[in-house]
Amino acid sequence: MDTDAATVKLTDLASCGGCAAKYSAARLEELLRGFVPTEAENLLVGLAPADDAAVYRLDDERALIFTLDFFPPVVDDPADYGAIAAANALNDVFAMGGAPLLALSIAAFPEELPTDVLARVFAAADEQVRAAGALLAGGHTIRDAEPKYGLAVVGTVHPDAIWPKNGARPGDALFLTKPLGTGLVMSGYKQGLAGPQQLERAVRWMRTLNKDAAELLRARSPNAVTDVTGFGLFGHAHEVAERSGVRLVLEWERVPAIDGALDLARNGVRTSGDPRNRDFAAPHVDLGETPEAMEALGFDPQTAGGLLVSLPAEQGAALEADFAAGKVFIRRIGRVEEGSGVAVR
């Protein structure tokens, strides 16, 4: 991180940062319950059910993926903020099995913010978009007292190769491609309980695109994929279980954490998104004797988190070997069974 050029503490301008700023999942679910989705033969993924992005079929070989994501600053460094916000939006396309094609900036900044700060946000986002194989081709910027930045992204995918949330099947193994705890580390750092090294590790994970993980996953046959972001591992696992009509069993001892995140949880650190995620997911999650710190990790809102993958268990060893050969992180964290809800064991 380049802290020398940071003339403003961006997080001081935001009431809540990163994906912890997401609207309550429970309220969003209630809001959309009565919404009648558009009926269109070529709308392959919309709101019935909602997924990580919308998908529209162009022809038998091509479909467009369209998503948008933006949030207030999660870190003070402008370049880190731009890169993380861009990665978070681009990762929605990778979570659908697609490749990003084109992106537009969605920006809101105070007029008094130094121009060079904004320039660094935009430049870092552009670098991420190019690394994802796409182009940043413009956008829209408005004045706002609280900074907000993100992207609208268009990608492509074969209509028969979409990775949905609702395809998990009994007998599948569950994998996660990034450790958890970004919200805990960010909150802990702001409270003076986490050090610069912990912050740098969390930022490095948040800046990491899910491109490499998605490319390795394409060689296999995933039944369900989603990226773990603002609703936390338990919230996104609940979505997969509910929409697939199955039970997800997570083994808490296998769930990976960013170094120091569990210690922060044991010391009582929580984000503002934690109670909203509990309201949404806790009624559907059987926590058993899960330690309190692991509960906090599971409900912790993630920013630019990894992929939660459900695929046939017989492919699991080969998948892990592929990721090890490519030096890309992956961890098996559970299995899929018949039933409903999420169980943590």
Image (spheres, helix red, strand yellow):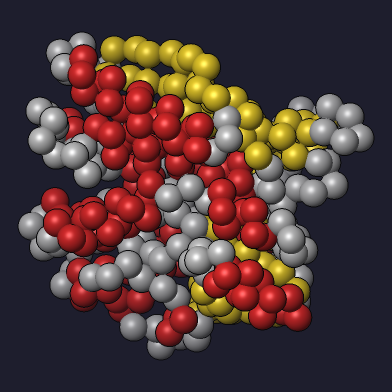
Q: Nearer the viewer, residue 246 or 304?
A: 304
Look at 33% across and 63% down and name the residue there: 181
**Image point 61% across, 46% down: which residue?**
94
Q: In the image, is 144 to the left or to the right of 226?
A: left
Observer able to see residue 3: yes
Residue 269, percent from left and from top: 20, 64
Q: Residue shown at 29%/12% (left/top)?
A: 143
**Where does residue 82 sit, x and y in percent of width and height?**
34, 33
Whether residue 215 is situated above or below residue 247 in the rendered picture: above
Q: How many marks?
A: 0
Q: Which quadrant: the N terminus?
A: top left
Q: On the rendered structure, is 196 left or right of 40? A: left
Q: Quadrant of residue 144?
A: top left
Residue 219 position (above or below residue 84): below
Residue 104 versus residue 208 in the image, above or below: above
Residue 56: x percent and y percent?
A: 77, 31
Residue under the point 56% across and 64% down:
326
| In-front residue for pair 158/174 | 158
Q: Quadrant of residue 213?
A: bottom right
Left or right of residue 295, residue 91 in this image: right
Name the one closer to the observer, 103 or 230: 103
